[in-house]
Image: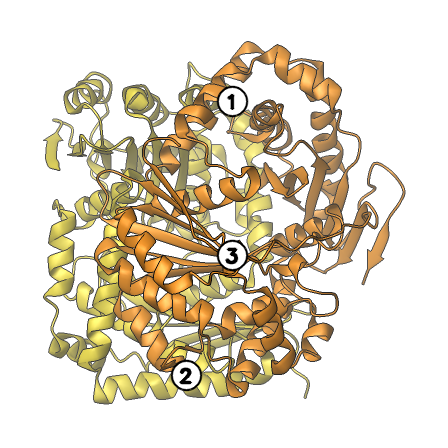
Chain colours: A orange, B yellow
Amino acid sequence: MPENFDKHTLKNGMVLLGEQMKGVESVAFDFMVPSGAAMLPEGVCGAANVIEDWLFRGAGEKNNRTLGDALDGLGLHRSSSVGSSHITIGSTLESSSLHQAIDLYADIILRPQLTDDQFKPARQLVIDEITALDDDPKQKVMLKLRELFYPQPLGRSTAGDIEQLRNLTPQKTRQLVSEHFNPAQTIFAVAGKYEFDKIVSQIERLFETGTKRSAQKIRTEPVAGNYTHIHNEGAQVHIGLMTPTVGPADEDYYNARVAISILAGGMSARLFTEVREKRGLCYAICARYHCMRGYAGIMSYAGTTPEKAQDTIDIIIAEFSRLSDGITADEIDRAKAGLKSALILQSESSSARASGTGSDYFFLGRIRSLDEIKEKIEKTNADFVISFLKKNPFKQYSIVSIGPKEINPPSAQQTRVN
Amino acid sequence: MEFKQKILNNGLNIIGELNDSAKSAAVGFFVKTGSRDESMQINGVSHFLEHMLFKGTEKLSAFEVSAAFDRTGAQFNAFTSEEITAFYAAALPEYISQITSIWIELMRPALRNEDFDIEKNVIKEEIAMYQDMPDFEAAEKCRTLYFDSHPCGQSILGSAENIDNLTADQMRSYFNSRYVPNNMLLVTVGNFNWRQICSLAEQSCSGWRQIPAGRNSDDYAGSCKTGRIEKPNIAREHICLMSHAVSAQDDRRFAAFLLATIIGDSTGSRLFWEIVDKALAEEAVVRLGAMDGTGVFQTYIQCSPQNADKAMDTVSRIFSDVAKNGITEDELAKAKNKILSALVIKNEIPMGRLFDVGLNWLYLNQYRSVADDLDAIKSVTIDQVCQIARELKITDYTRFSIGPSQKS
């Protein structure tokens, strides 16, 4: 274990992780509850989002209003999200209120009231958020891209399905909570200013159930197609593109990260230079790494007016393909500098560190120290990256476009949504 | 934390806040210019210039500029508002001098015609991108309606037509009148060497010529007009309200900030409990926009078209109630806790601190430590917040919405 990290495992298997940060007054924590969109059964798509809202509408002795007031009274800044594997709820706050906050979160996770009258507005808000995605094509295209790229149920929408939500009942949703809120498989991650011993004894008291419950296994199915177009009379065609790459535990992981950085790490990276600077095709263009357990990809976004959309996608794909032809020493140096510096800058933020340690543990079963990551980045070079790219050429692209005009994807197979 | 300050003979302000225990530092140039300083004819030029500065100098091409930044691993960017154009970067301490040198060079850009022509396309793509963001568009159109003929109502990006008509000469002449040392500020915060930054600036910026650069900073209380546009591809109603608030120079800004939090923070506020919690709208927030010489409360509501009237009735009722009956001690205490912890969290990171230090200097010509701001929030009384709520007439708002076609 790296020296500024802490770890403790409860008897039931729940893992507590910590990262001490010097010179900060804040602390951030996340509870990663294994009940994300892909972990729930068929036919209740969006239930995780309803649960995430419903949990906060009364817990323990407190009703909706008094719970909200208690959280606000501590001055904490809440964050919660629904992913494929987890519902993550947590907050960032001044460290003096940490233990009071954990008490409240234990009620929210273990003793939510989940009353019938609070179910309706919780569900309505989730349905409204899905409808509102139509007005945010930039976000919608990336959500749809994940659905297309990952095999089901990993690719299941993390926003929800309106029809399935309409059929969802409070009874059914309560049942999902009792089946899937498994403390034994919950990860707790904290970063910033804290005393780990105190946290351990508090969480032991609150979350130790004694019973071990194993992690749920999911079976994945093949992906459906490789191009989807959603028609929208907007000003731009929003393009999302994703291609497979290696996972975080792979020996080539850092070669992949350097490759992505060469493509899209900074303003001198290839996509920005070729698509925006030389040709003026886009304002927004980016690419990043994204993964789930067992699957990973490079995800790229570009937004452009209809007449430029085809050129944009063609050049993006050409840049992906060209990468294995050669990389300059300066490109490698810039990519490494960017990755290392991002690491240090991120290490100053308690909320970024709490979510970083939590996801590290989920994907790798351990936490990587900053020194380890730095060292592995240092070790890559142009030859390693090229040989990785030759071994794993970019062949398959999943593409989603939203806008007034379709594009021609590199191969013919496609589905259309109206 | 230690504050440092120096003014060059040509009026360039250099300030710094040293924090030896930080792992990084942030450095940037803040230029006191934005869309409010433009004539209608060249509207959009401030934002265009922000892009053009990255296109390089007589010595450096655009690619060389980007590569020079990227070699340091810096996270860097820029933004343009109605009144400020800011260029900023965060990086490890050992690179800060190098990055400061790049920024200094870029403040005297080549502004080449060929770069200008290609960048027009990028700017028009950016305009198109925002057209697909109705929340942004509603806010911008509401601002224009609110400020009427006051220059703060001018679009930051400008229209595509204006960008087409803009000439490189117009841009250069605007640059010459606004990017003058007396209208600029060099700020550094975090872990860095103050003497090194000063000597870099003395060597390279002392030759910049001082020219008076003023601005119309009149206050304006808003037009109270109403407008709406329909777009066939829109699913939700996006409603923006603007009403008169305090300026960035006004001592009452802390009370106004608390009032906005009490009425419209994203959780636990009056709008949250009456509108979002009840699922009348998925979003209902109020924020304070304290600007140079004037200020606005800006409200944003996003809901189904069917709920728009009901949501607006609720907003109006809450605004009237706060104006008439004020707020409670309990609400004030909670809002203070939220703001105090947000200030602490934000200022732990040099990039967050850069903006507070820089903007305080730009607006107030004053250094304020984090503790100064924390104390200012703590010392606000309930009477001060109630007085603001009464005097500022939040009920007299300008309203602009974007939504789908209304069936008759």
- Label 2 is found on which chain of the structure? B
Horizontal side of residue A265 vs B371, given as left or right: right
Residue displayed at 48% across by 17% down: A378
A129 vs A376, nearest the viewer: A376
At label 2, the amino acid type is: Glu
Name the mark nearer the viewer: 2 or 3. Answer: 3
SS under mark 1: helix
SS under mark 3: helix
Q: CA distance from mark 1 to mark 2?
A: 49 Å
Horizontal side of residue B168 vs A322, given as left or right: left
Q: Is residue A58 above or below residue B123?
A: below
SS under mark 2: helix
Residue displayed at 29% across by 31% down: B24
At label 3, the amino acid type is: Ala
Residue beneath disc 2: B274
Residue beneath disc 3: A184
- Quarter of the figure with residue B46: top left
At label 1, the amino acid type is: Ala
Total number of numbered labels?
A: 3
Q: CA distance from mark 3 to mark 1?
A: 39 Å
Q: Answer few, some or many: residues within 10 Å of disc 3's Cα (few below 14, many 20 plus, some between 14 and 19).
A: many
Which percent across, then down, holds residue A216?
Answer: 65, 55
Which percent across, then down, holds residue B283?
Answer: 48, 71
Q: Is residue A361 above or below residue A321?
A: below
In this view of the protein, can residue B269 be seen by the observer? Answer: no
